[in-house]
Image: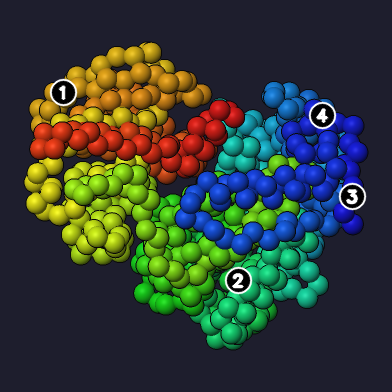
Amino acid sequence: MTAVSLDCPKQARCSGCALGAAPYREGLNRKAQQLSRALAAYDSLAASVLPPRAASPTIAYRVRAKLVSHRRELGLFERGSHRVLDVAGCRVLSSALTQASEALRARLPLPIHGADFRETSEGVLLTLLSEDTGSRSELVQLATALVSEGVAHSVALALRRPGEVRLLASEPEVVAGPAAARHALAEEAPYAYAAHGGFVQAHAGQASYVYGEIARGLAERLGSLAGRPILELFAGNGSLALQLARAGARVTAVESYAPAIELSRRAAREQDLALEAVADDAARFASRAKARFDAILVNPPRRGLSPELREALARAEPRVLAYVSCQPRTLARDAAHLRRLGLELTQAEPLDMIPWSDAVEALTWFQAAVPPAPRVLFEDELCLAVEKSPHELLRSESDGATSLTARVRGLSGWSGAVPLEDWGAELSGVCWFARDAESASRLGPAHRAGTRTFTLLVRGNLRKQGTVTRRSPRQSTRGVRYTKVHDAARHSVVSAKSEDADERAVLADFASIRHPVLGDAVSGDSASNRFAWHRHALDRAFVHVGESSFGAEADGTLRQAQSPLAPDLEWVLESLGSD
């Protein structure tokens, strides 16, 4: 059942249930509002947002938990600190996980820094997490005892290098009991094999609902599941793929973690289900796939889909795309990109997959649609300024529908539009076009002498203001004048004015003073870029043209356009601020 309140004495200190102080319905509505706000940040998104799907139960529901350990405490970090708060009597752990965690807690202290618990249909899979390589013998003896006493179905060890951020940072080694266990979300569902460290939704009932809704939604949109070719990316151990295969679909399941794919093959063989399981990166598989699929399903991590995968999904031209999201902001970012590529978000359903937490999940549906027109920022008889989207080519070899120029030429009266800029694909913000080639020739010199104001996020703590003049020989020496707007974690948000109409020159400027722009794959810092992608979902160079102006001697007109910071970059700054 759905509890009205959490009623936990440790809620104010525990980091696990951020919304536990409020009544359940209040927290549920807050989650739905987060999804609506994220989608509303993009003008191109106008999906129907359904009422939020409440969870039941909301107490003793968690079938997966990662707990940290210190001395005799086993729990979570206290809110805002790295002190371990013991969570004995936790209200949200399932009874099986409660029993297993109590048995482990009774044996503390141990040479471990945490434990990963996962409930299956055959018992609990327990992974002991340690940095102490010299304690292996002791932990193996413990594992054997826990399995023989029935505390766990099997136990694995996972060693972590000192300083590693992730709690579970290496592939677990099973040292007692079987390597995997059968697990079915519901009595009528096919079983999949669960393994130590593998992904699983925390709420079995909500996961079962999502898989059922996907099967129902696909059948409704495709007419039937029987014989339909369906591709699932980020398939994990194949729980959803196996369910769709039982319904008669021809399913291809793709997962980068090879052991999980082997488990899905095993489950399919044992249950006589037709399933093609492939161990591969999602973007690589989608880019190379020659087969056509009626529907594609994606369930990515919090950072969302990579730009390469979004483009591959659009090229695949599925009749239906179902996207299960665990982060509204990256969902909205991905949906806006897919909309421009011809796949429109039509429906979103907020889901409470982790009651009392601030996590928001959603089941969303996309279908083919004509790409939207660009947003016009300025227009007169000679030129036009529009808002360029991130990951959008200014031109393409065929000038097809994937380029900004093609979208501008679709505007009434601008069929001969010529870009005045030379922006790369990743930049967002103001972009100028002349009405035709003659207007471009007339306005070109004035435009090149104009001023652009860039918003950039650069690595490290930059001084308050300055001018960067160092350049490579092939670049001009006009320089960039900048002012630091504010600090963002250990980085600096800067407003930079430049006459350069090529952002590569501006990016090279800041790289030359050892403050490269975050996300810049050419001249940036690769380690910082990886961290920004995995932790803050920054999937491009953080560069936005917020203002651009130029005059024209021919008519004495000052032409000026402004564009607010792109929503995806706004969220990166918000995410950095929460560190």
Alpha carbon separation for disc pair 3 and 4? 18 Å
Q: Nearer the viewer, mark 1 or mark 4?
A: 1
- Horizontal side of 285 relative to 14 (left or right) equals left
User: Mark 3 or mark 1: which is in front?
Assistant: 1
Query: Would you name the residue on which mark 4 appears?
Result: 12
Circle 4: is it few (<14), some (14-19), or many (20+) Cα within 10 Å? Answer: some
Residue at the spot x=89%, y=50% of the render? 3
Q: Which kind of residue does numbered mark 4 sit on?
A: Ala
> Residue flagged by tag 1: what amino acid is it?
Arg
Residue 543: which numbered mark, if any? none
| CA neighbours of label 3 inside 10 A, class few (<14), some (14 to 19), many (20+) | some
User: 404 above or below 536?
Assistant: below
Left or right, 438 with respect to 559, comes to: left
Element type at mark 2: helix
Residue 351's image quarter?
A: bottom right
Which residue is denoted by mark 2 in the rendering? 241
The residue closer to the viewer here, 573 or 340, is 340
For the residues marked 3 and 2, what is the alpha-carbon distance in whole angstroms? 32 Å
Element on which disc 4 rests = loop
Tell me which label, 3 or 2, sits earlier in the chain.
3
User: At 37% from the left edge and 58% from the top edge, which residue is drawn?
Assistant: 373
Q: Which comes before the other along the chain, label 4 or label 2?
A: 4
Which residue was labeled with disc 1?
Answer: 478
The reply to whether dot 3 and dot 2 touch (C-beta < 8 Å) is no
Task: Give me the C-alpha separation between circle 4 and circle 2.
Answer: 40 Å
- Give amino acid for label 3: Ala
